[in-house]
C-alpha cells in the first residue's frame, strides 16, 4: 500500500504541474483569441479533431489492452521484448496510415463535425486542421511508449512529459500574440487570419505533441528497452490482444459518435457558449479527475492486472474498493469547491461581459455534478480491463451513448445560450446511470465489490461536504461572485484570490467534519503526511 501511495503521489505531482501549465495555456489562449467568437471555436474544433480520429482508431484500445498483455508477456523468457517490438511496429504502422488518410480527408471530416459553422469560419477550421492532424500519430506514439513504461512500473515519464507539450504550445501562443496581437473578446474575423498566423498557432500546438511523444524514447533506453521494428506479428499473442481490442474499438466508436453529435449540435450556438466553452468547461471538469483518480488508478492498474492474471479475485476486489474510496475522498471535496466557484473559475478564462461568465459557469456546474460518478466509473472500467474483459464495458457504454445521443439531439431545441449547458447536463445524468449499471455488472462478475463499505464511505463524504457547501456559498455571495461587477468575477486576479479563499475554508470544513466522523479513509490519507513531518525518533 505504501508503494501504491508513493507511486500515486509521484504521478499526481506530474499531472498537477502539467494541468497547471495546461490551464495557463488555455488562459493565455483565451486572452489571445478569446473564448467566444469565430477564431476560438474554429481553433478548438480543429485542435480536437486529431483526438477524435485517434480515439476512434487506437486511443482506448491501446490503454485497455496494452498493460494486461505486456504484464502477461513479461512471463516470456525474453521478458516480453519481442512482443513489445511487434506491438509497437504494428501500432505505428496503423497510426501512420491513419494520420495520412485523416489529413487528406480534412475537407470532408471538418464540415461533417462542424456541421453548423458559417462558411468563413469553417474554412478557417479546415486550415487549422491541416496543421493539427499529424498529432494523431504522435498521440499514439506517446500512448504506446508510455503504457509500456507503466507496465514495467516506470510510472513517472507518462505523467511528466505532457509538461513539455504544454511548454511548447504555450510558447507558440505567446509567439502568436507577439506577431498578431491579442483579441480577448474574439472580435477578429476568419478573413483576418493569414497563412502564417494559422501555421504558427496550429503548428506549435502539434509540435508540443511531437515533443511529448519523442522524449519517451529516452526513458525507454533508461530501463533497458530498445525499439527494433519487427513485422512478424505471429507467435506472441497478438491474436488474443486483437480479440480483446475489438470490443474496446466498438466502445470507442460509440463514444466518439456521441462526441461528434455533441459538437454538431453545439455549433448551432456559435457566438454563444459553443465549442471552445464546452472544451474549456470539460478541461476544468477533468482537472481533479486527472490529478487524483487517474494517478491513483494508474498506480493500482498494474497490480490489478497481476492479481487478475493469477485469478486472485479477493485482492482484485480489495484494490478496486480501495481505489474508489481513496479517490472519492478528495473528489467529493473537489466537486463541491468547483461547484461553488464555477463563476469565478469562468471569470479566469473570460474577460468579456458577465453574460459570458454566466454562460461558461453554468456549463461547468452542469458537468461537475457528475464528477464523482465519472471517477468511480473510471476505476470500475479499469477493473474490467484488468480482467481482460472489454466486452462488458462495451455494453454499459452503449447504454450511456444511447442516452447521450437522444438527450443531445433534444438540446438542439433549446435557445442557443443554453445548448452547451443542456449537453453538459445530459452527459452528467447519463454518466451517473452508466456508473450504477457498471457497478452492478462488476458485482455480478466478482461476486461482490465491497459495495456496502463503498456506499458508507460515499455517504460519509457527502454529509461532510454539506457544511462545506453552505460556507462556500456564503463566501461566494459575500465576495460578489453571483452578480455583475462583484469582486470575485471582476477580473482574473480577483477570481483566483476568491477561489483560494473559498477553497481553503471549504477544505478545512470538509476535513474537520471527516475527523469528527472518524473517517477511516481520511486516517489512511493523513498518516503518511503526519509521518513525513514528525521528528525522527518520535512515535
Image: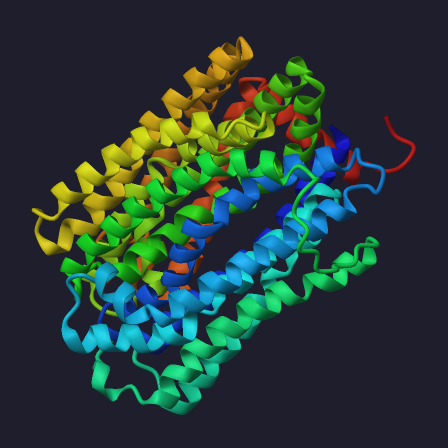
Q: Would residue 423 be found to the left or right of residue 177 on screen?
A: left
Judging depth in this view, the residue of 123 and 44 nearest the camera is 123
Judging depth in this view, the residue of 373 and 464 nearest the camera is 373
Judging depth in this view, the residue of 236 and 201 nearest the camera is 236
Q: Residue 316 in the image: x percent, y percent?
A: 64, 20
Residue at the farthest right position: 537
Residue at coordinates 30% horizontally, 28% vertically from top-left? 399
Compared to residue 389, the image places residue 223 above or below, namely: below
For the question of whether residue 535 can be seen, the reply is yes
Q: Quadrant of residue 486?
A: bottom left
Q: Residue 275 in the image: x percent, y percent?
A: 27, 60
Q: Quadrant of residue 394?
A: top left
For the question of whether residue 20 can be seen, the reply is no
How is colour applied across the structure in the image?
Answer: rainbow
Q: Residue 290 in the image: x percent, y percent?
A: 52, 46
Residue at coordinates 37% horizontally, 61% vertically from top-left? 48
Q: Quadrant of the image for the C terminus?
A: top right
Compared to residue 303, the image places residue 91 above or below, namely: below
Compared to residue 244, the image places residue 215 above or below, namely: below
Q: How many marks?
A: 0
Q: Residue 457 in the image: x percent, y percent?
A: 51, 19
Residue at coordinates 52% horizontally, 78% vertically from top-left? 171
Judging depth in this view, the residue of 523 and 261 nearest the camera is 261
Q: Would residue 113 be found to the left or right of residue 116 on screen?
A: right
Residue at coordinates 49% horizontally, 50% vertically from top-left? 58
Q: Quadrant of the image for the N terminus?
A: top right
Amino acid at each position: 500500500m505504501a508503494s501504491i501511495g508513493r507511486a500515486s503521489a509521484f504521478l499526481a505531482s506530474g499531472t498537477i504541474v502539467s494541468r497547471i501549465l495546461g490551464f495557463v495555456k488555455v488562459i493565455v489562449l483565451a486572452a489571445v483569441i478569446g473564448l467566444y467568437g469565430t477564431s476560438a471555436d474554429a481553433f478548438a474544433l480543429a485542435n480536437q479533431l486529431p483526438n477524435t480520429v485517434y480515439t476512434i482508431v487506437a486511443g482506448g484500445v491501446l490503454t485497455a489492452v496494452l498493460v494486461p498483455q505486456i504484464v502477461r508477456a513479461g512471463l516470456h523468457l525474453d521478458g516480453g521484448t519481442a512482443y513489445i517490438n511487434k506491438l509497437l511496429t504494428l501500432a505505428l504502422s496503423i497510426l501512420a496510415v491513419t494520420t495520412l488518410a485523416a489529413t487528406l480527408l480534412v475537407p470532408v471530416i471538418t464540415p461533417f463535425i462542424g456541421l453548423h459553422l458559417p462558411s468563413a469560419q469553417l474554412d478557417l477550421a479546415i486550415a487549422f486542421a491541416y496543421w493539427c492532424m499529424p498529432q494523431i500519430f504522435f498521440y499514439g506514439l506517446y500512448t504506446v511508449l508510455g503504457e509500456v513504461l507503466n507496465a514495467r512500473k516506470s510510472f513517472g515519464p507518462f505523467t511528466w512529459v505532457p509538461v513539455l507539450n504544454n511548454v511548447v504550445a504555450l510558447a507558440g501562443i505567446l509567439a502568436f500574440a507577439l506577431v498578431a496581437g491579442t483579441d480577448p473578446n474574439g472580435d477578429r474575423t476568419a478573413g483576418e487570419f493569414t497563412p502564417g498566423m494559422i501555421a504558427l498557432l496550429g503548428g506549435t500546438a502539434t509540435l508540443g505533441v511531437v515533443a511529448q511523444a519523442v522524449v519517451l524514447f529516452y526513458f525507454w533506453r533508461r530501463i533497458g528497452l530498445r525499439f527494433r521494428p519487427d513485422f512478424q506479428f505471429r507467435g506472441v499473442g497478438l491474436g488474443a490482444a486483437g480479440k480483446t481490442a475489438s470490443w474496446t474499438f466498438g466502445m470507442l466508436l460509440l463514444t466518439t459518435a456521441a462526441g461528434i453529435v455533441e459538437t454538431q449540435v453545439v455549433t448551432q450556438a456559435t457566438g454563444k457558449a459553443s465549442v471552445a466553452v464546452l472544451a474549456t468547461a470539460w478541461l476544468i471538469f477533468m482537472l481533479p479527475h486527472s490529478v487524483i483518480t487517474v494517478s491513483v488508478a494508474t498506480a493500482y492498474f498494474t497490480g490489478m492486472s497481476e492479481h487478475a492474471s493469477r485469478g486472485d479475485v479477493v485482492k482484485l476486489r480489495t484494490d478496486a474498493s480501495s481505489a474508489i474510496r481513496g479517490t472519492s475522498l478528495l473528489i467529493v471535496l473537489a466537486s463541491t469547491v468547483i461547484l461553488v466557484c464555477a463563476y469565478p473559475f469562468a471569470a479566469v478564462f473570460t474577460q468579456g461581459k458577465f453574460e459570458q461568465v454566466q454562460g461558461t459557469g453554468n456549463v461547468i456546474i452542469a458537468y461537475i455534478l457528475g464528477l464523482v460518478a465519472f471517477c468511480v466509473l473510471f476505476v470500475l472500467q479499469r477493473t474490467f480491463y484488468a480482467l481482460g474483459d472489454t466486452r462488458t464495458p462495451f455494453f454499459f457504454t452503449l447504454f450511456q451513448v444511447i442516452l447521450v445521443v437522444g438527450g443531445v439531439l433534444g438540446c438542439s431545441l433549446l435557445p442557443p445560450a443554453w445548448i452547451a449547458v443542456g449537453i453538459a447536463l445530459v452527459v452528467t445524468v447519463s454518466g451517473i446511470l452508466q456508473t450504477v449499471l457498471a457497478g452492478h455488472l462488476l458485482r455480478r462478475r466478482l461476486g461482490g465489490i465491497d459495495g456496502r463499505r463503498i456506499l458508507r464511505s460515499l455517504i460519509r463524504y457527502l454529509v461532510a461536504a454539506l457544511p462545506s457547501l453552505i460556507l462556500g456559498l456564503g463566501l461566494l455571495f459575500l465576495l460578489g461572485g453571483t452578480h455583475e461587477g462583484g469582486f470575485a468575477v471582476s477580473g482574473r486576479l480577483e477570481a483566483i484570490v476568491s477561489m483560494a479563499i473559498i477553497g481553503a475554508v471549504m477544505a478545512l470544513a470538509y476535513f474537520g467534519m471527516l475527523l469528527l466522523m472518524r473517517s477511516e479513509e481520511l486516517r489512511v490519507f493523513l498518516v503518511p503526511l503526519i509521518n513525513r513531518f514528525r521528528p525522527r525518533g518520535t512515535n
